[in-house]
Image: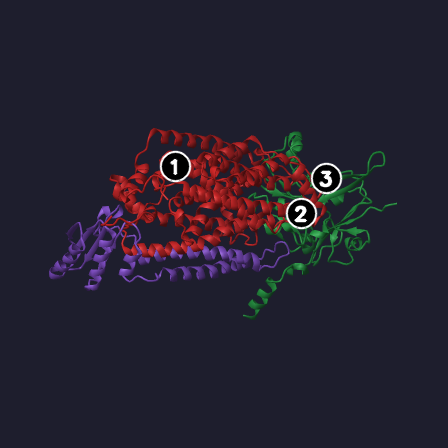
Chain colours: A purple, B red, C green
Amino acid sequence: MAIMGTFAFEEDFLAAAKNLTSSGFDNISLLSPLPLEEAQEVLGLGKSPVRHYSLAGAIFGAISGFAMAVATSLVFILPTGGRAIITIPPFLIITYEMTILFGVLFTLVGFHFISGLPAWSDRPYLSSASVDKFVVVVEGADGEQAARAETIIRDAGADEVRHVEDGQ
Amino acid sequence: MFDHGQPSYADVNKDIISTMLETGPKYWTLLGITVSVAGICFFMPWFYQLIVGVGAAGMNRNAVWGSYLSNFIFWIGLSHSGTLLSAVLHITNSPWRKAIYRSAEAMTLFSLMTAAMFVMVHLGRVWFVHWSFPIPNQMGLWPNFRSPLMFDVMAITTYLTASSIFIYMGSVPDFAAVRDASTGLRRRLYTIFSFGWRGTAREWHTLGWAYTFFAVFVIPLAVSVHSIVSWDFALSAVPGFHHTIFAPYFVTGAIYSGTAGIVTVMYCLRKFLNFERYIGQVHLDSLGKLLITLSLIWTYINILELFSTWYGGTSFELEALSFKLTGFYAPLYWEMLLFCAFVPLLMLFKKIRWSWNKMLVISILINIGMLTERFIIVATSQPRKFLPGAFGYYVPSWIEFSITVGSFAIFATLFLIFIKWVPAISLYEVKETLRPLRRDA
Amino acid sequence: MSTIVEKLRQYSKPGYYDKFDYHWTMTIDLDRCTGCEACVVACQAENNLPIVGEERFAENREIKWIRIERYWEGEYPDIKMGFIPMLCQQCDDAPCETACPVYATYHNQDGLNTQIYNRCIGTRTCAVYCPYEVRYFNWFTYTWDEPLEQQLNPDVTVREKGVMEKCTFCIQRIRIAKDNAKDDNRRRVRDGEVVPACVQSCPTEALVFGNSNDPEAKVSKMMKSPRGYKVLEELHTTPSIVYLTKVQS
């Protein structure tokens, strides 16, 4: 069972979110049509772990890029232009590009892992949340807790409160 | 920021998404024209060339590289504004970026694709182009990673991948908005495109971080891409190519022509999609100032190139220089200086910088100048290499002219398709620039 | 393990392939050259060079692996003419080789700058990078009118459109000579056993070809001549062809 409160104003929405977290509700989602730093602070989201993926990708790319350049030039020994077979300066350029390529790809993977997307199954959502409405969703609250959450949301000035069944 | 009063959040959604959902006959006519021009001017001559051989173009023994390669550099250059500028402005938190960056990034993507087409057109045996990719094969043969062209392959594929991811990830929340505003098949498609985005604080947070990292990766990448393109030339010993200044020269030129390209595209978006409300004087003014700065840097590097050639004083270099300044293609050289060094100075005047029509003309002139700049580099250096016995000249054939025209149609086609599939202005970032709605207001 | 380290050390050293059995070299005595172009014709016949026709020639698209460049010195009537046969210099530090993204040109064990037609994708970078402009591109697929196709050399590939080609020092003849030497249980090819078409046809013996790793070879002795120079030596391409300058009276 999930409770959804819709707000027209950013400040009310943030107030509701703050009250909910301070009252011990931890399974809440804050839907907004634009990124709100305050909302992220309410949920205590600091530095995102996505940066670890970026770093790992960059390191992996650098190593694999250089290794690819060296290994492939050792498969057949084909000297060109009097240069060495393992030619460091040009291979560093390959390394550089591969660092960035894998940095970007790993960041993408990290984004999907951390955000839980793609998630095409139905989750509590209001289509106006992508236009101009701010929505607080409290999940996993039953009976008395649900009533308490609803009061908090209504007190903050919600336009509308809905109860949605899970898995809907 | 907004010339015609501040729109509400709902207005933003309605204004921008309606350009995608409502398609008039004007759009279809335009699309029909660009598709047929691309087909007739680009693909048909190209197929003819594939059957006959690259000899269908005007290149000869004295200049084995021709307009295909100079157009390739031009399109790569045009791609440099979008993603690079967008990333730099994202990192530096410039608010005027937000209304224009989506279409600027699209420009990057599509000019890169057009540039890639020119590689295909340029190659003698394009049907073996996959040999230049590091694909494991039964013969155990790999590409030569010492080759500057191989740097190009790596750089451009990375750039294409990174900038597609950059523009796609930035659009995910907007795809969700389109999903919510549409029905039927379109709704199902955009549900897939948007990954089921809901806009929760956690999603925004992760996207913000990931996006910043994409930007951080893309900036050095974009700089490296055009440096590497310049090394295709600078790593040879050919007089006129062999300059250490080439990497910064090409990067500056790329950002310069790209920024001019943004002005042109902004004009068209404003005109045809009625984005007057979102793309205003602030953007034009900022882009104008950027263009002046870039033009001055570009002019400086040009003078430096002439000076260092003259000061170096080797007979080969001087011969190449005098061919460039006074030879067969000298009129083109002076035209380039006029369009890229002198005309942009007009933007010092606020009256010109603030006028959309005048800026459109200047931006197009700059890009004509930059197109010829690349052509001059390719066409005047090769016929004056070392041995006077092999001096000559090169004139493009009608096929090359036709393919050049067709490439613009390809770009326009891709862009026209883009504006119907992706919101051309970022919805959520425009909303960020609006004052939040308050109860007491 | 130690062999791997040794190998890696060897491979990261430039020009490690200096010490192979052969280093094919040519000397061109400009004092003997009359500019008769017999070498050009011989090369055309030996290496299946296409006959491009008048129109293509005017477009500067002829294919001549060896060409005679003609230079005039001074003003009429006090005028002098000079010739210089120009062919692939088989550079040890060849700029063209590093340029190829697919290894279609590389340095083989005989110190030859080889061109692999089947591998070429036609980027033409090698031709741009070559300071001697001796790389020729097949702008079209050329055909031979009857009965000219009967004279094609079966030892040499006929190239198709989109492929770069250049002088190979008649690698097919080198190949045959090496095979013969192997059949006779000789380790080396004898001096004078390999004669490229241009050298064979030169009436004044201006061209001398041989293995400069062999100090007794004729070409090694010719190279030591005080008249010797290399074209565009300042670019450090280290060409394998030594020109002997004209004796000025």
How far separated are the C-alphas under marks 3 and 1? 64 Å
**Measured from the top left, where is residue B25 in percent x and y?**
34, 29
**Measured from the top left, where is residue B169 in percent x and y?**
36, 50
Q: What amino acid is labelled 1 in the image?
A: Arg
Question: Looking at this view, is A128 or B141 the one in front?
Answer: A128
Asked whether the residues under the numbered discs 3 and 1 touch, taking CB atoms below 8 Å apart as contact, a structural biologist would say no
Residue B126 shows in the view? no
Quarter location, residue A154: bottom left
Mark 1, residue position: B270
To the question of a shared chain for discs 3 and 1, the answer is no
Q: Secondary structure at mark 3?
A: helix
Question: Looking at this view, is B122 or A92 the one in front?
Answer: A92
The 10 Å Cα crowd at callout 1, few under 14, some 14 to 19, many 20 or more, is some
Quarter in which the N terminus of chain B is drawn:
top left
Q: Chain of mark 3?
A: C
Quarter location, residue C41: top right
Asked whether the residues under the numbered discs 1 and 2 touch, taking CB atoms below 8 Å apart as contact, a structural biologist would say no
Res C40 label: 3
Mark 2, residue position: B309
